[in-house]
Amino acid sequence: MKLIPYTFIVLQYQHSPFAGERLNIGLLLVCEKRNFARLKIRESWKRFSDAYPDFDRGAVKSDLKSLSGAAQRIAEDSFSTPLDTQARCNTAEGLMLSLFGTPEGSIIWDSQGSGVTHDPHAELENLYDKLIGRFDQVSHHERRDDEDVFQSLKSHLDDTQLLQQMTEHVVRSPRGDVRFKRSFKNGIWHCVQPLSFDHSDRDTIDSKAARWAGHLMQAEEASENFQPYFVIGKPSKNSFLSAFDAAENLLSSAPRNPIVVREEDSADVADRLVHAFRN
């Protein structure tokens, strides 16, 4: 069977332009010779809800479905448009530019890829599984969350009065608010955030670190002075330790000079907090 060329792009979701992290949300494949343009949208959104509590799944899915329908209609009409832009809308990237404009806002994409196939439908499924689907495989490992990581710090503070004095605090700035669940004030606010990096893929580890680094970037213009502390927990898979190291480095270099300690060293940050509380 004759092989025919195709192009594709991976669409990504960007929650905050300041944080810079991106998560894949779908794959668009265009095969002009078959009048084929299909967008396969991801089925699992748990990673998004875990990463962004205010993630509007309904709105994003609605936008993607509208985009998918428009792409199919243009393909079925042999990639012609009222503005006669066929020359630039018969590739995956060209089609996105024609329908969506420049990659800005929450739905974005990078440069396109290409290849040859005898079956565009099968190629779309194959590329989706390779680039998106395989990262959503369910793991039976019970992963540790942020509260599990906090227990290591809590054990060093149980004999003090500090835990009872901790409260939620929101750092407000013109670029956005940052919410810390456990904070106390003694001269300045001391804001504690445990972070578990026990995730099933590198993307989520990278995204979580980038999101909190982005939060501190947002808070850089806050009028109040505060000291952030991060207690971070390792991934259970040794193959992800390099991503964990990178996450630690990213957080350590974020604005506002955060104090970043690993879970096993939580006694060190406990001593710092008790000292700040009593002096």
Image (cartoon, rainbow, N blue to C red):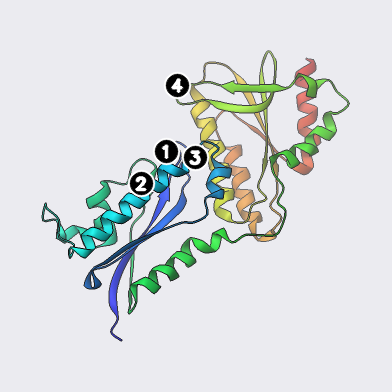
Name the element at disc 3. loop
Q: CA distance from mark 1 to mark 3?
A: 15 Å
Q: Is residue 212 left or right of residue 112?
A: right
For disc 2, the marked residue is 63
Q: Residues within 10 Å of mark 3 (few under 14, many from 20)?
A: some
For disc 1, the marked residue is 17
Which of pointers 1 and 2 indicates the residue nearer the eye? 2
Residue positioned 85% across, 23% down in the render: 160
Q: Position of residue 114 (x, y in %)?
A: 33, 68
Q: Residues within 10 Å of mark 4 (few under 14, many from 20)?
A: few
Which of pointers 2 and 4 indicates the residue nearer the eye? 2
Mark 1 or mark 3, earlier in chain: 1
Q: The C terminus is located in which quarter?
A: top right
Which of pointers 4 and 3 indicates the residue nearer the eye? 3
Mark 4 or mark 3, earlier in chain: 3
Which of pointers 1 and 3 indicates the residue nearer the eye? 3
Q: Position of residue 122 (x, y in %)?
A: 40, 73
Name the element at disc 1. loop
Residue positioned 59% across, 56% down in the render: 201
Q: Residues within 10 Å of mark 1 (few under 14, many from 20)?
A: few
For disc 3, the marked residue is 55
Q: Amino acid at mark 2?
A: Asp
Mark 1 or mark 2, earlier in chain: 1
Question: Does the residue at mark 4 contact the one at mark 1 (Cβ under 8 Å)?
Answer: no
Q: Residues within 10 Å of mark 2 (few under 14, many from 20)?
A: few
Residue 257, image quadrant = top right
Numbered tag placed on residue 174 in the rendering = 4
